[in-house]
Amino acid sequence: MQKILVFANREIYDRFPLYLRQNIHFFMRVNLVCLPLLVLAMSLFGANTGVGQGVNTKKIVLSANGLTLRDALKNLQEVSGLTVFYPSEVVNQYPVVKLDKQTRTITETLDVLLSGTILQYRVNKGNIVLSVKDADDEQGIRISGIVQDLAGNPLSGVTILVENWDRQTDLTNSSTASDRQGHWGLVVPSEDVNIKFQYLGYKTVVKSVKEIQRNGVVFLEMSQDNLDEVVVIGYGTTTRRKNTGSVASLTAKDITSQPVSNPLAALSGRMSGVLIAQNNGVPGSAVQIQVRNQASLSATSSGSIPLYVIDGVPFTNFNGSQPANDNLNAFSSSGSAGGLSPFNMINPADIERIDVLKDADATAIYGSRGANGVVLITTKKGTSGRTRIGVNFNTGYTEVNRFIPMLDLDQYLTLRKQAFTNDGTTPTIANAPDLVEWDQKKSTDWQKFLIGDRGHVSDVQANLAGGNDYTRFFFNTGYRSESTVYPDDNKYNRITSRLNLDHRSSDNKFNAALSVSYANDDSNMPASDVTSSYTLPPNYPLYNQNNELYWVVVNNSTVNNPLALLKRRALSNTNNLISNANLSYKILPGLTAKANFGYTITQLRQNNQTPIASQNPSNNPKGSSSFSNTKAQNWIIEPTLDYGTDLGSGRLTALLGGSFQQNSSHTQTTNGTNYEIDALLGSLSAAGNFTASNNIVYYKYAAAFGKINYDWKDKYLINATFRRDGSSRFGPNNRFGTFGAVGLGWIFTNEDFFKDNGVLSFGKIRGSFGTTGNDQIPNYIHLSLYTPTTAYLQSPAMNVVTLPNANIQWETTKKLEFAMDLGFLKDRILFTANYFRNRSSNQLTDASLATQSGVNSFKTNLPALIQNTGLELELNTSNIQQENFQWRTSANFTFYKNKLVDFPGLEQSYYASSYVVGEPINLIRLYHYLGVNPDNGQAIYEDRDGNGTINSDDRYIADLGTPFYGGFNNTFSYKGLELGVFFQFNHRFGVTKILNSRPGAFTNQNEYWADYWTVDNKQTSIPAPNSASYNQFTQSDAVYGDASYLKLRSVNLSYTLPTSWASRAKMSNCSVFVQAQNLFTWAKNPYVLDTETTIGGGPPGLGTGTLQQVLPPLRTVVFGINCQF
């Protein structure tokens, strides 16, 4: 079937770009597998059997004496299995109802419950809709319409009533609720009244009768500050009001308002306690995330990476590297992109929300995988109603938003000559061709040449959504194309498709959800980041006299021509299929059985090419090419039982479940050498020689878990979780671990003594304590591992890779938190303060071995105890809330401190020179710089021990961590116009002001060295350039400083066309927009491209503090249009 489809349209097929044609067969195979499943699911889900027993005949038993009408209706919903919609403002006015316990039909029960009220009911397709009765003698006007969200999806259960309606004095003004299609109707006394629309989680809207009659459709906007907003937690949902854990959330609107390809990049600065950093600015590059600081000594080997869960399915790394990392890369050299990020496989347009779980109460349900936080990604679902089509297109440009001030040619040449003079050496053609041979007048700005171009970015999305009361669907497909700012043709392309299908039976007992997503990434980038070449001498020539690439050897080392580096390519192509199914069945009232099935398969192909043309021809080079093919698979099954019931004056819910997961990865790498022709580098058969290797990894995981939650009187909350985990990464002696947590909450504003408080509208105190674990270590380390090596005495030989450690066990983190949530002025101001203390022990890391063992180190547990404490503050305000103008503000601040509390035997260990008990683990030892000796230009340092000699004992400890960071956002809305402006800030110490090479060497320097000491310039703080004392100078606080920055991270300006305009084009909604990312950066240190990417060796904010010469995150500006039909 595939060949028929392809070759019947061969002419059209040949017009597709090469990377699309390479993946058409894979994509069609995916469709041929998924299409029958979709047709089968639709046929099964589409078969409705009716409501079953009619409401007039089905018998139920319900007692509601002494309950409010609202609680009685909730109980009716549980017992009957039907969904009840009602106008909450009317229902809440009836404090007590009378309903004796006896067997009745549903209609009989409703007749008794609603007797004595002004409410009436109707039953429609398994739903009970309550509305206010019309008065017999009413002389009003009947109006009707549709209520939808901003995306055009119908909203059911919206309360609609006349503003300032008094049921005691005026029965002609009715109230109602919208049905599943969003339709509603009511009677009003005149055209002069206003109609109020209220819905949980959405902003209240007030419209005039004339406006409703004119437009017909009323749109509600989701509230960002609502305490009843749904929050996704482990294996369930809750609300901000009832949540006892610490959860940070970001909604679809905040994600899609930013022109990012990686959804994690949208989180940067928007969540307290969550630190985000982009590896570099190359399209498709990885994003690092850290939740509540570094908890492990093994941070550089991904020991602090959180767990990612997409629609309930853990999302594992694709390339099979262990421990898991955020890069897709099979080669040890990551190339300019730093490895493609797996999260580029997830289209930001598919995401409904992202929730980050931080404390023990929120994360302990995930056990050993929750120590470093949990990132929950929920994708969009379909809604009932007519089929809706959406199209979003944007295009724009990318560019570097700031450059480093460098020495000009004259300054550079003068510095070089002075350095030779100070060192007492003579420039020659072998050590200084820039001084002896090259043009002394012709100069190149290498920053502008290498990274000064503009890249192009385009993104188009098309979606289809709809359904009926029982079956809903959402389909989205997207294409994204990006180029780089390098002076060459570099491309990154991504195709994504997602289908989400939801179904429920007519009796509300059976629910099923199917989600399938496909993604293809194709990247053609330089094999190395040429940004680092901006330090070339300003007069370096690119071409020789024959117009060929110029090559030179300086100090016995070949200087790479940047144009030659651009010829070395890193090609990668990734196909990824993520699928999951969720099934649930209501066994008994309150008891539901669920099962979650997930399967992921990824195929990654990479080819790194080094052509002959990219090498010095004087060495008679040959071409080389490395090929890698990886196939990674992951499956998971999680059955659960959910139970909920009213107990006493509260609500009890419980969860019991299990998790069974297996990951496998097979990577085959082949290195070809001695290529004679560059055009054949893509063919392994053209290699003169080649070597091959493979790597097969299996990882198995099993767990049992449970959760109990009790909500008493909407005041007192308790949540307890436990989990028993087993991981194949540990030996049989310590394979299993037990983790758990308890969370408590008190909504004190629901107490009688706080009722009718005019200022404080909501108040909750909460706290939690628990234990989580960490198994982020390589596989098989409890076993002896070997690798083949050169034959010995004509016999096969093996090298020892790791020594066994059968006693290795879980790393554990004990988390403690106290928090307070406050709402003021009817929740127009929401404030949250979290204090946390996390202590991580039994550290999984390396220990050194004697050289005689043949292995330098091995993985083990060390008795180190790391403590992270912090204070997180969040503020959300609705400053102005008028009909035509709104102004909202949100801000978050995180203050934290890290230290090594205990490490028995540290002084005798492998880490004696790296850590100090009582100090941060992100430390660096520095000499305190006092200035320059004006007599000789030498640097002066503080002699801390007073022995007259400057040595390593005179260094002090500095913290390279991030003591505080955060962000603040302002959104202004005027009619259809909306402007969002978001700033991010980060304060920390570190980032050297100088380059890695000494001043006066064969590299240009930044302007820091413009004012160095000379005999004519003795009043300066910069020492004379020389090689003798340079190393000590680089280890002083003279070259370290404030690495803080303030970024205008994103700006979004949009205009929604009036409904009357859009309707003329047969559209339900249409908006045009301009979006910008990384627009401006303000930093105290002008000598780095971007401090976000300049800390090397670890998660964001950590590392050595040295300057990393990589392409920074780029300024991105796009213009687009979003239409709904």
Image: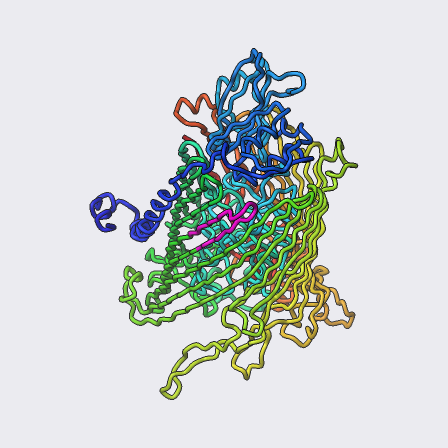
Predominant SS of the magenta segment: strand
Q: Residue furthest front?
A: 102
- Label count reads 0
Give the image location of residue 695, x and y in percent: 41, 69
Side (left or right) of 692 relative to 590: left
Q: Which residues are magenta?
A: 579-598
Side (left or right) of 675 relative to 374: left
Side (left or right) of 824 relative to 628: right
Most foreground residue, 698 or 1022: 698
Most foreground residue, 999 or 370: 370
Most foreground residue, 1083 or 961: 961
Residue 167 part of the magenta segment: no
Q: Residue at x 60, y 66 (%)?
A: 737
Give the image location of residue 914, x and y in percent: 65, 68
In the rendered image of this protein, does residue 780 appear above or below residue 27? below
Image quadrant in which the C terminus is located? top left
Give the image location of residue 819, x and y in percent: 71, 48
In the rendered image of this protein, does residue 588 appear above or below residue 559? above
Q: Residue at x 29, y 46 (%)?
A: 16
- Residue 836 can be seen, yes or no: no
